[in-house]
Image (spheres, helix red, strand yellow):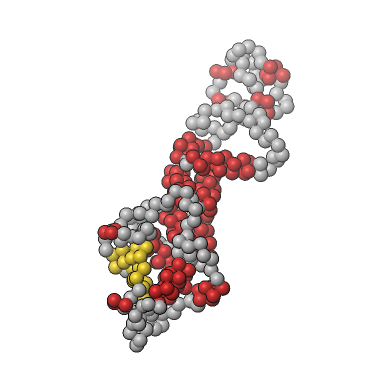
Amino acid sequence: MTKRAGSPDIDAPASKRSSTSPSSRSSTPDDLAIAAQPPTFHTGQDVVMVIVGEGEDSEIFIIHAGLLTYHSGYFRDILKSKSSSRAAGDAGSGTSIGPTMPKVSLPTISPSTFGILLHWLYTREITLPSGERPGLVPLAKLYLLSKKLLLLPPSTSYLYQTLVFGSIDAASLSHLSRFCYDSGDSLLEDLAVRKTMETFGRRDIEDVMEGMPERMKGDFAIAMMIQCVKLPGWSEGGFQGVFETVDPDAEFELETPWKMESADVGAESVHGGGAGDVVGTGTGAGEEDQPAESVEGRGVRER
């Protein structure tokens, strides 16, 4: 791989993209038969020059043609069309080098993301270059690129699974969510909702909602409802009588509302005494002066 210059991350996804592939053509049986022949490197191989990016930020990659045509339907089509007009290389070495080397330009692709993908094709290991921001966004870009280049379905599926089982912290959720929803890819949108539900906590609610793309809020609400009705014991009206009764910044669990207190609570505690009574305790006036952690039977527990 020959580098022209350092390049920024330039493959920010286009909004409302209808398709993430350069071609809507599906693989034919003949294509799959060709793809089923893995490359070998025991002898000299044809190579391809792939120019990724644009201008001073572009990079040049010299890649074995067999590797590309085996894994990528996009390169298979491109190189097949070029082969008829390409001059023959050195027959002795089996390679095509120099002026006769076929060239493919990918001006809209990030050299960084392409390099990660190429490393994975050769080694089957996903590693991020130094300086690349860690997290799931680089993997989401890798997954989108695999679809653009029409990688074999098992490869694209594997890359998506690395996202599904990857970890993310709450602070990175908004970055991932914005990228996924800007990509226009439905599976990435589902991933953003899933990762938010898996990761955010009680204290993160405000920040998560503020950083959430507008289109995602409806999807997130529906997903939360679907998961809530799956909870054990839920039939209908599962939130009836449930409301927040403590400061969300306090170190307590959700307090049980007075309507849901145990049956042995006295009627005098429910219907109250004086204005100073604490509802639901059954101990009479003056109890409000006791510290919360010393009051029993309220359903408030320290974490």
- The residue sitting at the bottom extreme is 92
Q: Position of residue 198 (x, y in %)?
A: 54, 46
Which residue does the image show at 35% across and 60% down from the upper left? 107
Q: Position of residue 15 (x, y in %)?
A: 44, 48
Which image quarter is the C terminus in?
Answer: top right
**In the drawing, does residue 296 fall left or right of residue 250?**
right
Residue nearer the viewer, 220 or 81: 81
Say above or below: 74 vs 12: below
Say above or below: 237 vs 101: above
Which residue does the image show at 48% across and 35% down from the upper left? 206
Which residue does the image show at 51% across and 67% down from the upper left? 152
- The residue sitting at the top extreme is 274
Q: Position of residue 192 (x, y in %)?
A: 50, 48
Which image quarter is the N terminus in?
Answer: bottom left
Say above or below: 117 vs 245: below
Q: Position of residue 240 (x, y in %)?
A: 67, 31
Residue 128 image-quadrant placement: bottom left
Q: Is residue 196 among the parts visible in the rendering?
A: yes
Say above or below: 152 vs 173: below
Which residue does the image show at 63% across and 43% down from the upper left? 226
User: What number of labels is visible?
Assistant: 0
Q: Is residue 68 among the parts visible in the rendering?
A: no
**In the drawing, does residue 83 fall left or right of residue 251?**
left
Residue nearer the viewer, 245 or 126: 126
Residue 253 image-quadrant placement: top right
